[in-house]
Image (tube, rainbow, N blue to C red):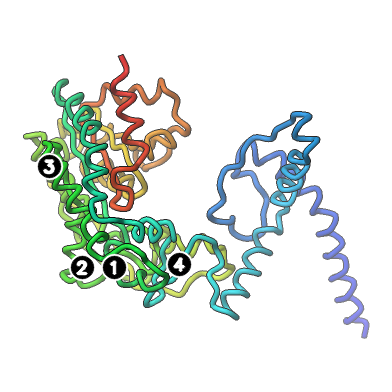
Amino acid sequence: MAINKHIARTVWALIFTVLLALPVVTAWNLIAAPMNPRLLAIIGKRLGGVTAKDPLDWSWKAVGDGTLQKALALRVAEANPLRPWLIRSYNQLRASLFDELTAQGLVRGKDRQLLETFYLDDYCQRTVGMADERARDRIPLLKDIQDFYRSRGGVFLFVVTPSKLGYMPEAFTGTRPCPSTEAARNELRPRYVELLRQAGIEVFDAAALVYAQRHVQAMPLFPRDGAHWNDLGLAIASVAILNRLNQVAGRTVAAPLTYSMTIDDQATERDIDLIGFQNRLLDPPPIRTPHVQYRSEIDCSTFPGRDANAAIVGGSFIRMTAEVLIRDACMARLDSYFYLKLEREGGIPFRTLDRDLSPAQLARLRDTQILILEENESFLGKSAHVRALHEILMQR
């Protein structure tokens, strides 16, 4: 009986201590978050898929309509150190009991393949003739960009990257009504690339390369629980891109690479990013995952191309190729501009160098000697970063 009373007192003491500590730690998090997110004190892993918040509006109008009060209340709730653990526990319960997807904007296809719904939205809205319409708008911009670099003795390459949906369309097109025809869905990329080539644009279709490997490789090039290509898909495309870059340049600007592969059950964050968005308490079960090791016969320390001023402008697929080119292909001065303005990345280890780039920072692209511009197959002809880059280069 005495032991039970001691245990009870200990439990109540712990609860009391936690209740006392919560407001103190919450206050600390409110102060620390704006300074450095690493200073946050939380229980469990941080939540994934959290976007940056808009600055607080301290105007009387915001006070009058309650906007400021709501924003402050949300910040206090998010500063609670128990919040990540509570959310993950709730999501894990829903997933375990009801097999629910615990994040918005996801769709589950055949064989439990995961995909973000906006890829499917775009895919199912394609129409016959869309490639011609988009190419007519894009070709003048791309010709101007290409001419800008070539006129200065530079190198330009436009790259089309694949999508998981384009790689395995049958896994997802049956999950919802898809009004577009199969002919329209299959026409967009090949026709778009053909029209750009006819116009003299230097294009490398990495999507076609990856799709052609689907029944050649021993394992898929896209992970079940991820949105982007796995290590093997990345290697196949990246080696081909750098080889094409050297051909276009007429010299070796990137060290030629070969690669070897091992397979284990240790998935990288990229292989399970769509699980990460669901913020569950438990890690997903192990899954067969390829891991690639690159090799080059060139010594980067003496490679003339390591000092070339190079840049990649594009989205989430090509930024992975940027890391390979910097780390393994000796392009030490290459910078990756994530959707042009959002982030500038580079260096070894590959990391974010700047965020929310200013016009002055983006003006560096006018002095670049080697430029790789990328659009993903899902957004051909409508990626905002292409037009934005054109505006920067055409400034007088």
- Which of disc 4 and disc 3 is earlier in sequence? 4
Q: Taking 49 as reference, is 239 left or right?
A: left
As shown in the figure, which amino acid type bears the numbered disc 3? Arg
Q: Residues within 10 Å of mark 4 (few under 14, many from 20)?
A: some
Q: Taking 54 as reference, is 261 left or right?
A: left
Mark whose residue sits in front, 1 or 2: 1
- Which of disc 2 and disc 1 is earlier in sequence? 1
Marks 2 and 3: in contact by CB < 8 Å? no
Residue 354 at x, y = what percent?
A: 44, 32
Q: Marks 2 and 4, Cα distance to the nearest angstrom?
A: 22 Å
Q: Residues within 10 Å of mark 2 (few under 14, many from 20)?
A: some
Residue located 87% across and 65% down the image:
13
Residue identifier under label 3: 197
Examine the rendered structure and indicate whether residue 324 appears above or below residue 150: below
Q: Marks 3 and 2, Cα distance to the nearest angstrom?
A: 25 Å
Residue identifier under label 4: 107
Residue at far left of view: 250
Residue at far top of view: 396
Residue located 29% across and 21% down the image:
394
Residue 181 at x, y = what percent?
A: 28, 64
Residue identifier under label 1: 168
Label 4: element kind: strand
* Disc number for residue 36: none
Marks 2 and 1: in contact by CB < 8 Å? yes
